[in-house]
């Protein structure tokens, strides 16, 4: 989608209700990036009440659509509530989508014993392939 208009509302004008309206329409059409931006509005309480349930919903929708940062954030959430195996799976998928922070997190989780050596190696290979594909 074209986010220049919404980005302008969101950052320069502080017109969060218009940004919310714009992102909601785009998300309703299945736009992955719009779901991610809606998650940020709910997470920060910009133009809407802070509501973690809706943050997670929009992360999930964006992640299903292939949004790397949303997928990483789901990993963070799952780890926060003690579901480490699920968290690692999210981080591995995000890494394969080129999310750098997920590689860093996987390396930390490897040192903590939550990630196997072969899982980390596979994630590093997939991450490199994703990054190389964007060059």
Image (cartoon, helix red, strand yellow):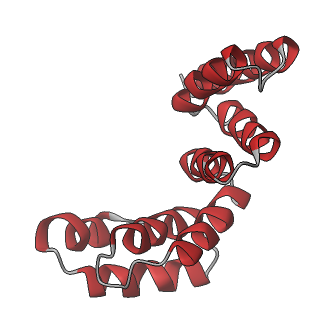
Q: Position of residue 12 (x, y in %)?
A: 13, 66
Q: Position of residue 72 (x, y in %)?
A: 60, 44
Asked where in the image residue 56 lies, by quadrant, the reply is bottom right
Is residue 44 or residue 82 the one in the foreground?
82
Vertical comparison of 132 with 56: above or below: above
Vertical comparison of 127 with 28: above or below: above
Q: Is residue 29 left or right of residue 21?
A: right
At 67% from the left and 24% from the top, the residue drawn is 109
Vertical comparison of 61 with 92: above or below: below
At 64% from the left and 75% from the top, the residue drawn is 30
Q: Is residue 116 left or right of residue 18?
A: right
At 61% from the left and 24% from the top, the residue drawn is 103
Q: How many marks?
A: 0
Is residue 32 or residue 69 the one in the foreground?
69
Asked where in the image residue 50 lies, by quadrant, the reply is bottom left
Q: Is residue 31 visible?
A: no
At 29% from the left and 83% from the top, the residue drawn is 47
Q: Is residue 98 visible?
A: yes
Q: Position of residue 94 (x, y in %)?
A: 66, 39
Asked where in the image residue 13 lies, by quadrant, the reply is bottom left
Q: Position of residue 20 (x, y in %)?
A: 37, 82
Q: Is residue 125 left or right of residue 17?
A: right
Give the residue furthest to the left. Answer: 13
């Amino acid at each position: 989608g074209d986010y220049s208009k919404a980005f302008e509302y969101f950052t320069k004008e502080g017109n969060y209700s218009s940004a919310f309206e714009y992102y909601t329409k785009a998300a309703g059409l299945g736009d992955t990036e719009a779901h991610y931006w809606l998650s940020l509005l709910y997470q920060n309480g910009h133009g809407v009440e802070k509501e973690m349930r809706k943050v997670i919903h929009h992360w999930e929708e964006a992640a299903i659509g292939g949004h790397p940062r949303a997928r990483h954030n789901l990993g963070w959430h799952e780890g926060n509530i003690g579901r480490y195996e699920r968290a690692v799976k999210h981080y591995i998928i995000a890494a394969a989508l080129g999310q750098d922070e997920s590689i860093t997190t996987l390396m930390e989780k490897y040192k903590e014993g939550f990630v196997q050596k072969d899982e980390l190696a596979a994630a590093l290979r997939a991450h490199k392939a994703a990054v190389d594909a964007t060059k």
